């Protein structure tokens, strides 16, 4: 083990990795396992009121926490990119592939990578902590095969784990899944379980299009995805629906593919009985729900024309939108048409848009100020958006925060 | 010629059709040709002020016209579906394919198909006329091949032409293009020219994804599309960017594919120099611009991060949004963040959403009332959205209306 590193645990039995190495049996799992074991599997519907009361009683500070539910590790050390490049270059010849343990990043390098970025921005913007996952566009589920995705997810998630241990008050982990285009998502269950049960993560990112912009997988409502959903329900963790990079020239990643993925997923939920089959399954649709709130009348009308139940009944116990909408008018719309209980604060920093808006003098992605200024929200709604909704949707979060 | 029918004209020379028939030489073109010839090709930038002055002087009524720029013929007689079915069933055996002339729909049937639908709704909602095109989801550019698309576009456009002759005050034509997946859009030029120069149409619908949800064509900014753009500029007609049906199970057509197509196209424009190459080319992005206005801060920020010019300079002389957004909050956002000169009134009736919104007691797609109630608009802005912007963007429209 390298000096100064916190290494994530491994399952009890040695397993053959994509690179041809064998992973050692579980070792340094104590802290993470205790954290992870403290949440009961979720089988009851979300009770926001009860959780709000708990948050209040929990003494989260005068103003409460500001939980950013959507942050990616987009300031990775160069060594991670080098590892990934070696892995991709070696595709087809496992003997040349790097081992998970070949990645050599010190704790100091990790600290350096976030101190001037995410942590500084948390301080400057007054946000408390970030639910943190590997870079979304880096997941690259269209690259290589399932073994490639498995090793890549493992090193990516392990870095997130180390950051959550270095900064337990600032980061809570959400995992990348080892999806691979054309491969049934059953292959993701072990990594999900490892991240939640061993590393203390509270959710996962689920890519509705592992093909990278060619949309070859079945809709999220298809039974293809059900084994993964069963595990999510068992572990009491939600998924953020989040595509990865676009390998299709028609789709700009952050400007089109991301937003389309959100809109597409919502419509898959609207037209299906997924939440009849999984009443406690929960999804966060990021980027403010794609196009959905802007077209809320269209979606209400489509559901009505199709003789579906009202959206509040059909999916609003299961589907939540984040606040990654980078101007005041957009947040005003979101908070006007979507019930506050379905909105989770997020900024996706450091993410898709890094500049300062000349119209406001503030960063586009400093979304807290839009929430503060939204005329549709009262204090209770803001508290729900900033904290208690996240505690409700991420069923294991409160046990982590209040431990 | 069948009794009581207005038949569209044909190009001067006989041409072999997909069904194996020969089309007769041009015949009954007088009225359409006069209409069509009265517009000069556009080579100068849009001058909304001048056109607004002309509209006022033109005496369009005390309140002016209310031009709905987005209507599809979604109430087609059954005979059209039967013809299409025969055509698809015969694919691969041209001898079995129906001729264009095999479609037998009388003027009375055409009248009946719109009297109780589009025309009634125009009266009830106080809209003056509809810029009218074949059913978007029916274009089906992923079906068959280029010859199939050519014949199908011809019969579809000819019906629109007949309706514009039966109801010249209510309908102005926009054509379906005979796009076909994998086929360069040069093959659309002849049909565009026929529709504009012979049938008096004022624009076309351009499908950015002829593959029907698999997104196999190059971005709209690619030179693949340039020959068609050259013809559009020469003819002074804009295109509405509009996908057709989704053959991909992940995309619900009107709830996901349509909206994604809009968002995708906008981002293609944002990242390209298309409008440097074609300064007078104009596109209408329907459905309120997809997700774009809701994420206007994201798009401004993305352009800024990419060191692109401001959006107003980069594309707002060329890209326009319609008002097919089916709730007040959505229209309020649209009219707040997008300059009024870039918004064209539309409802897409009879279209994607047919029901009555229980929250308002009015049809979801009765968008005129949202415009009337938008707090961001003054009388001049409303007039621009209802009429003068359409006259500016559809360069041949005023000549049609004021003839």
Image (cartoon, coloured by chain):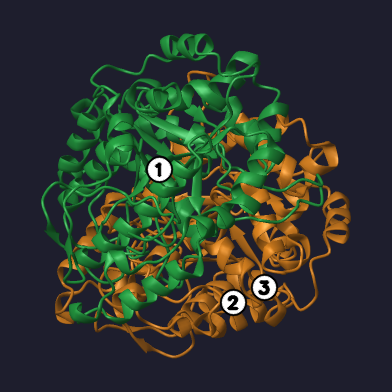
Chain colours: A green, B orange
Residue at 30 percent across and 27 percent down: it is A307
**SS at badge 2:** helix
Q: Could you give the CA–CA distance between mark 2 and mark 1, rounded to whole angstroms?
A: 28 Å
The percent position of residue B164, horizontal first and vertical second, equals 54, 57
What chain does mark 3 sit on?
B
- Please say whether residue B103 is visible from this viewpoint: no
> Of discs 1 and 3, which sits in the foreground?
3
Question: Are discs 2 and 1 both within one chain?
Answer: yes
Verify CB contact (< 8 Å) between mark 2 and mark 3: no
Rendered location of residue B60, percent (x, y): 79, 46
Q: Quadrant of residue A225?
A: top left
In the displayed structure, B286 sits above or below B92; it is above
Whether residue B292 sits left or right of residue A362 in the image: it is left
Whether residue B184 sits left or right of residue B265 in the image: it is: left
Residue sitting at the far left:
A13
Label drawn at residue B112: 1
The answer to whether residue B211 is visible is yes
Q: Which dot, 2 or 3, sits closer to the camera?
A: 3
Secondary element under disc 3, as helix, strand or loop, is loop
Please give the count of numbered marks on the rendered protein. 3
Query: Which mark sits nearer the N-terminus, 2 or 1?
Result: 1
């Amino acid at each position: 083990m390298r000096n100064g590193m916190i290494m994530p645990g491994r399952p009890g039995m040695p397993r053959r990795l994509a690179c041809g190495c064998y992973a050692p049996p579980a070792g340094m799992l104590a802290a993470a396992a205790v954290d992870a074991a403290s949440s009961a599997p979720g089988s009851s519907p979300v009770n926001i009121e009860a959780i709000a009361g708990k948050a209040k009683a929990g003494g989260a500070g005068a103003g409460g926490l500001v939980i950013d539910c959507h942050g990616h590790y987009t300031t990775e050390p160069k060594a991670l990119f080098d590892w990934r490049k070696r892995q991709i270059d070696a595709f087809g010849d496992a003997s040349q592939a790097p081992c998970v343990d070949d990645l050599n990043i010190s704790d100091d390098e990790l600290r350096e990578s976030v101190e001037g970025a995410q942590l500084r921005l948390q301080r400057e913007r007054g946000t408390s902590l970030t639910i943190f996952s590997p870079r979304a566009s880096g997941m690259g589920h269209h690259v290589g095969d399932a073994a490639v995705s498995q090793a890549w997810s493992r090193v990516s998630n392990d870095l997130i784990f180390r950051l959550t241990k270095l900064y337990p008050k600032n980061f809570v982990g959400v995992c990348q899944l080892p999806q691979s285009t054309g491969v049934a998502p059953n292959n993701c269950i072990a990594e999900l379980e490892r991240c939640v049960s061993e590393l203390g993560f509270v959710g996962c990112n689920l890519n509705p299009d592992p093909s990278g912009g060619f949309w070859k997988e079945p809709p999220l409502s298809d039974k293809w995805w059900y084994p993964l959903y069963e595990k999510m329900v068992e572990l009491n963790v939600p998924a953020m629906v989040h595509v990865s990079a676009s390998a299709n020239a028609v789709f700009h990643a952050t400007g089109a593919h991301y937003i389309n993925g959100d809109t597409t997923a919502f419509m898959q939920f609207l037209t299906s009985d997924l939440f009849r089959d999984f009443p406690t399954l929960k999804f966060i649709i990021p980027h403010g729900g794609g196009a959905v709130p802007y077209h809320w009348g269209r979606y209400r009308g489509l559901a009505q024309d199709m003789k579906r139940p009202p959206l509040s009944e059909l999916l609003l116990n299961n589907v939540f939108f984040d606040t990654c909408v980078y101007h005041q008018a957009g947040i005003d719309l979101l908070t006007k048409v979507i019930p506050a209980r379905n909105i989770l604060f997020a900024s996706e920093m450091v993410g898709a848009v890094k500049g300062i808006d000349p119209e406001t003098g503030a960063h586009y992605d400093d979304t807290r100020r839009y929430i503060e200024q939204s005329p549709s929200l009262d204090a209770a709604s803001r508290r729900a958006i900033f904290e208690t909704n996240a505690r409700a949707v991420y069923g294991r979060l409160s046990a982590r925060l209040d431990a």
